[in-house]
Image (cartoon, rainbow, N blue to C red):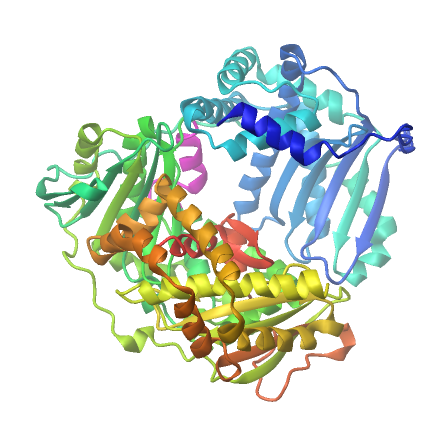
Amino acid sequence: MDIDQLEAYIVDSFESMVQPEEAGQDPDMGTVPKDVGFRAAIFTDEEVISEEAWLTTSRPWQFEPDTEASRTKRLPLDLAHYILGRRFEVLAKEEGSPITDGYAVRENLVNLIDWGHVVVTPLEGRWEDAVRVLEQEVRRAIEYGFTSSELNDIKNKATVGYGAAVATADTRESSDLSWDFIDSINERAVFSTPEVDLDFIEKALDSTTPEIVHQAFKNYWQTEDVALFLTTSDERAQTTADELEKLFMDSKEVKVAPPEEGAVISFQYTDFGPSLGTVVSDTLVADLNIRQLILSNNVRVNMKVTDFDQNYVAITARFGTGRLEQPPLPWFDGFAETVVDLGGLGKHSFDEIDSIFSDNSVWNGFYVNKDDFEFSAEIIADDMEPQLQLMAAYMIDPGYREEAVRSYKRDVPSFMNYLQHSLDGAIEYVDEWLWGNDGRFSLPATEEELLSYQGSDVKDWIHPQMTGGYLELSMVGDFDIDTVLPLVLKTFGALPERNLTAKEIGDEARDINFPNPPSYRTFTYTSKIQRAAAIVAFKIPPIKEDIRLSRRINVLADVFSNRIFETLRKSLGESYSPYAYADASTSFNQGYIWAESEGTPEVTAKNSQLIIDIAQNMSVSMTEDEFIRAKKPLQTDHEESRRDNYYWLYNVMWESQQKPWKLDWSRERDADYDSITLEELRVLAAEYLVPSNAVRIDVLPVAKDAGVQEDEGSARDLRQTVELIKGTLSGHTSRSSGRSFTMKEKTRHDKLRLS
């Protein structure tokens, strides 16, 4: 980076900004009330996603310069809050628990209010019991403090986190650094290096005892100035607002016991058989620097060493057929993810695994994809052996524990409520229709459908594929192959023999009945909030072995997206953030260009028709400038992707032995994109972006008493979302372009554009 050039750019961009001669007065922010005593309140709204019980305390924020001493002073309360949140997580998994989650935190609000809050999410209809849990767990911490094992757990995790920052410091991205600078300015904090942060945390943690953490929690929370409030969608709770305080005070009469010291547990999966695996085939793909192995038990291994993320390694183990052979049950893939993820192992619960590996970066995520299952992780290279042991253990002895089933079922009612009152929920209902109401992508009509699932249902579907199906293990990052390969051989190489080839799945399982265009549907959801969406889906081909057509449609979709934005947002001001993208499946015979414009209900029908009008004109009016503005960012993304471990893992390597053409996709991608012409896009626009190929959809809010109103032939009543719930239950939910994706699905969608 040329510093002088960057400085000149900043000056040129901002020198026209002039400070007024008389600066504006600081606003009167008021004062934080003191000595107000205990207060209770209930807030009721039918559109509340889930009930929450809050215990809060506030006082004026006392600014202190950011020094080692001030950081050390704040640390014990942060540790106490983490431990309390961890206790809520464990309680939520117990049979009969009235809560689904909980956390504790202290926040600085606009450098004015020091605000602490402890929050629990009640199981539907059990907020009274949840309030008792909230009161008693806070009081237990005040009276008895925290155990050595609890403190050691968070000490280990904190040290690992700061150590990882040091290990990867030399390959941090500029964008991350810039946000760190901005945060330090806003927080009036010193911008310290990872090395300084690690040195501080190690010294501070070394001197922190359970007694110090206990005292910090008592000093903060042992006060009469606390507020208890409940947010709920239950209208009956309005009549009990006066009783909330009594409920809380009566709970104080219940004696609480001190926390029990945790036992030290050793991992029970370190020996995977009497004989190590051997390498029976070893191929170097020289031009891509990828090493492909076949082991004696038929496990396939793909390895690529990079220096993009210092000391980091990304790993995936993919197997089976995923949703291609999923039972036709509503959102069964999401249930399976929860049961495998939170179900632990045969010899260890999920919480035990979390504790065992608290002193390193090891973790394991399980995903049901459209044509496979996946275990994945991103770790520090030094933790390769325990990571491979954990992954291999899941391949032979997943727990399918009942506590995971309970965790899933506790969240179902609140998510159903969310979907019935949200635009995003209704849009997932649109997705179900576009996927032909196929049972594998369907949404449940009632809570009872989801609540009927059992852990054994997941085991019947997944276990045979997990223990014996075709398996490719892929890893990319900063590691030494000669060091890692022996670890692979004594873990994955020692597993029982697997299928040598992947199962062939025919078109019968891949075919999706996309709605016949042209067609028009209206979907509704119940809400006072006037958010609506105009959506148009244009059918396109799926991605097969020849990906060239899909690449051209990607560029066309970007041109279309830019024009929608220019017309609906900039010229007409009719939409918040209109956009379009191409979504073609590599697994199913399904694909469409999705265009969406969010706005008020009054303009939705007009906007969906405008999108079709804009599309219809693309083939004759697309300009060279529009073409270049869409193509250039893609080319930049492609250049950057060559230094992205996840591009190599998900776009090139992870199924490259089953689908060797994925290697060719990488080889010829850049040249193919460079060869795309404006005339090609005009021809494709004339074929696909036409009214006769369009499915037009309006999604609108309706009042509570209005009922569901849809055009004749539209789909059934609002159903449960698939991907949104899946992402939220497994902790990976993200938002992108106004739509809901799980983090994994979002990553997949973005990465396919890089192919």
Q: Provide residue 286's location: percent of width, then percent of height.
A: 17, 41
Q: Which residues are magenta?
A: 344-358
- Give the quadrant of residue 680: bottom left
Residue 662, above or below 639: below
The number of discs equals: 0
Q: Nearer the viewer, residue 601 or 210?
A: 601
On the image, the x and y values in percent for residue 424 come to 61, 63
Residue 105 location, quadrant: top right
Say if the magenta span includes residue 352: yes
Q: Residue at x 74, y 16 (%)?
A: 64
Q: Residue 340, relative to residue 686: is it above or below?
A: above
Q: Residue at x 56, y 35 (%)?
A: 86
User: Which residue ends up furthest to the bottom in the rendered image?
Assistant: 712
- The answer to whether 698 appears left or right of 619 in the picture is right
In the image, residue 725 lies at what x, y percent? Answer: 54, 58
Residue at point 52% right, 79% down? Answer: 694
Q: Quadrant of residue 446?
A: bottom right
Q: Is residue 451 visible?
A: no
Q: Is residue 417 magenta-colored?
A: no
Horizontal and vertical percent for residue 19?
A: 82, 29
Residue lying farthest front?
624
Specify whether residue 161 is in view.
yes
Residue closest to the eye, 304 or 677: 677
Question: In what quadrant of the picture does the C terminus appear?
Answer: bottom left
Task: Answer left or right for 634 relative to 670.
Answer: right
Query: Is 301 rendered above or below residue 514?
Result: above
The residue nearer to you, when weighing 345 against 183, is 183
